[in-house]
Image (spheres, rainbow, N blue to C red):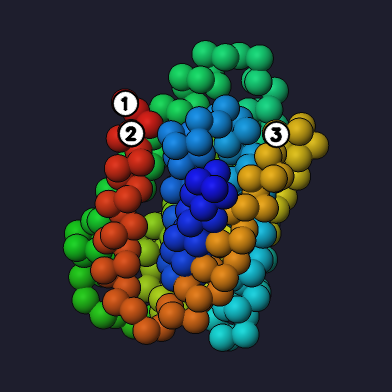
C-alpha cells in the first residue's frame, strides 16, 4: 500500500506546486526519486522528465483556458531550449557506463544546481534581486527568451531541473511580468521542453513508466488545482516555501 500512496502523494504535492508557480517539478521530484525511492540517477532524470511533461501538459491546458499564456513567447523560449535539451540529454546518455559521473558527479551537479536556484528564489522573495517595488510590466525581448530557454534547456536535458525553476528565477530577476502570465508561459513551455527531453530517455529505456503512472494519478489533478489557484494565493509565501524545500533537497544530495 505504501508503494502506491507515497508516489501518488508526492505527485499530488508537486503537481500543485507546478500549477501554482511553474517551479518545483524536477527540483523536487528528482531528489525524491534519488533519495527516497533510491532510483539510479539516469533513470531518475528520465522518469522525472516523463512525469513533468504529462503533468505540465495538464497544467498548461488549464492555464490556456485561464488566458495566462503567450504562445509567441513560448515559441521564442522553445527555439533555444529544445536543441539545448537534446544536446544535454545525449551527453548524459552517452556516459551511462561512466559510473563515477553517474553516481557521484551527476548527484553533486543536481545538488549544487538546487542550492543555487533556491538562493536565487529567496533573494527574489526578499527583493534583494530584481525590482524592490511594483514596477511597470517589462517583457523580455525575443533574444533574451531564446538565451533563457537555452540555459534552462541544457540543464533539463542533463538533470531534469531548470525547465521551471531556473527559467522562472531568471525571469523574476531581470523582468517584471504579471505572475499568472509568467507561470502560464513557463508551464506550457516546460511541457514542450520536458516532452522533447523525455523522448531521448525513452529511446534509451531510461524511464520507469509504471512509477510515472502512479505519480500522475496525483499530479494531474494537483496541477489543475494549482493553475486555478494561481491568482488567489500570496506569491511570495508560495515561492519562499518552495525555495526552502529546494534548498533542503540540494543539501541532502550533496551529503
- Residue found 44% across the figure and 70% down from its top: 20
Could you say whether the residue bearing mark 2 is in a helix, strand or loop? helix
Q: In the image, is residue 111 above or below residue 150?
A: above
Q: Give yes or no for contact between labels 1 and 2 (Cβ–Cβ under 8 Å).
A: yes
**Whole-percent x, y for residue 9 in the image:** 48, 56
The residue under label 1 is 255
* Quarter of the rendering occupied by the C terminus: top left
Specify which label sits upstream in the sequence, 2 or 3.
3
The crowd level at tag 1 (other Cα within 10 Å; few <14, some 14-19, many 20+) is few
The residue under label 3 is 206
Specify which label sits upstream in the sequence, 1 or 3.
3
Label 2 to label 3: alpha-carbon separation: 23 Å
Q: In the image, is residue 233 above or below residue 53?
A: below
The crowd level at tag 3 (other Cα within 10 Å; few <14, some 14-19, many 20+) is many
Q: Where residue 252 is drawn, which disc sits there?
A: 2
Q: Which image quarter: residue 64?
A: bottom right
- Residue found 57% across the figure and 78% down from its top: 63
Q: Give yes or no for contact between labels 2 and 3 (Cβ–Cβ under 8 Å).
A: no
Amino acid at each position: 500500500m505504501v508503494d502506491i500512496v507515497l508516489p501518488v502523494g508526492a505527485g499530488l504535492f508537486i503537481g500543485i506546486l507546478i500549477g501554482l508557480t511553474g517551479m518545483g517539478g524536477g527540483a523536487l521530484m528528482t531528489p525524491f526519486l534519488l533519495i527516497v525511492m533510491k532510483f539510479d540517477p539516469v533513470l531518475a532524470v528520465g522518469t522525472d522528465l516523463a512525469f513533468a511533461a504529462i503533468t505540465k501538459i495538464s497544467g498548461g491546458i488549464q492555464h490556456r483556458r485561464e488566458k495566462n499564456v503567450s504562445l509567441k513567447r513560448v515559441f521564442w523560449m522553445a527555439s533555444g531550449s529544445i536543441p539545448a535539451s537534446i544536446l544535454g540529454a545525449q551527453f548524459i546518455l552517452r556516459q551511462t557506463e561512466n559510473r563515477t559521473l553517474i553516481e557521484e558527479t551527476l548527484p553533486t551537479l543536481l545538488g549544487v544546481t538546487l542550492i543555487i536556484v533556491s538562493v536565487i528564489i529567496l533573494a527574489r522573495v526578499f527583493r534583494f534581486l530584481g525590482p524592490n517595488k511594483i514596477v511597470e510590466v517589462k517583457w523580455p525581448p525575443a533574444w533574451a527568451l531564446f538565451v533563457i530557454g537555452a540555459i534552462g534547456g541544457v540543464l533539463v536535458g542533463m538533470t531534469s531541473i531548470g525547465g521551471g525553476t531556473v527559467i522562472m528565477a531568471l525571469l523574476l530577476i531581470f523582468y517584471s511580468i504579471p505572475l499568472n502570465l509568467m507561470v502560464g508561459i513557463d508551464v506550457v513551455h516546460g511541457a514542450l521542453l520536458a516532452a522533447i527531453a523525455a523522448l531521448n530517455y525513452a529511446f534509451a529505456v531510461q524511464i520507469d513508466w509504471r512509477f510515472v503512472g502512479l505519480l500522475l494519478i496525483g499530479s494531474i489533478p494537483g496541477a489543475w488545482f494549482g493553475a486555478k489557484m494561481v491568482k488567489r494565493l500570496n506569491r511570495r509565501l508560495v515561492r519562499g516555501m518552495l525555495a526552502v524545500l529546494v534548498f533542503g533537497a540540494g543539501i541532502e544530495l550533496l551529503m
